[in-house]
């Protein structure tokens, strides 16, 4: 036997039914794309981590002892008349 609340529910119109069908189809498509994207991201992340683990660690490069900043030489300035018109 049906419940009283179910008896008085309005039935969806044809437009609403078609809209619901379209919405559910679109949600299924986007959900499938989301799952595929997350799987690809996880696969690429694991590949990157494996590659980084296989490579030797990067060494930090020491600055050149004769660099301009360390010698205290001021940077070159543009001449006053070199601007475009």
Image (cartoon, rainbow, N blue to C red):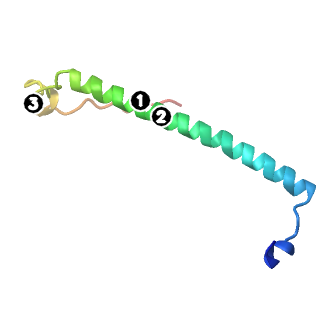
Q: Residues within 10 Å of mark 1 (few under 14, many from 20)?
A: few
What secondary structure is marked by label 2?
A: helix
Query: What residue is pinned by disc 3?
Result: 71
Question: On the image, which quarter does residue 75 sit in?
Answer: top left
Q: Residues within 10 Å of mark 2 (few under 14, many from 20)?
A: few
Residue 31 % position (x, y) = 61, 43
Whichever of callouts 1 and 3 sits on the residue coming sooner in the sequence is: 1
Give the position of the N terminus as an image quadrant.
bottom right
Identify the residue at the far top of this view: 55
The answer to whether residue 73 is seen in the rendering is yes
User: Which residue sits at x=67%, y=43%?
Assistant: 28
Q: Residues within 10 Å of mark 3 (few under 14, many from 20)?
A: few
Alpha carbons under labels 3 and 2: distance apart:
53 Å
**In the displayed structure, would residue 42 be above or below residue 4?**
above
Q: Which mark is residue 57?
A: none
The answer to whether residue 79 is seen in the rendering is no
What secondary structure is marked by label 1?
A: helix
Query: What residue is pinned by disc 1?
Result: 43
Q: Are marks 3 and 2 in contact (CB under 8 Å)?
A: no
User: Which residue sits at x=86%, y=50%?
Assistant: 18
Alpha carbons under labels 1 and 2: distance apart:
6 Å
Whichever of callouts 3 and 2 sits on the residue coming sooner in the sequence is: 2
Question: On the image, which quarter does residue 71 sit in?
Answer: top left
| 52 lies left or right of 27 | left
Query: What residue is pinned by disc 2?
Result: 39
Q: Are marks 1 and 2 in contact (CB under 8 Å)?
A: yes
User: Which residue sits at x=26%, y=29%?
Assistant: 76
């Amino acid at each position: 036997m049906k419940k009283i609340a179910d008896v008085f529910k309005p039935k969806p119109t044809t437009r609403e039914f078609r809209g619901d069908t379209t919405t559910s189809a679109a949600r299924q498509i986007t959900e499938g794309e989301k799952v595929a994207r997350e799987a690809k991201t996880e696969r690429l992340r694991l590949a990157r981590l494996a590659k980084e683990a296989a490579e030797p660690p990067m060494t930090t490069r020491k600055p050149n002892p004769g660099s301009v900043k360390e010698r205290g030489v001021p940077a070159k300035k543009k001449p006053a008349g070199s601007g475009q018109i």
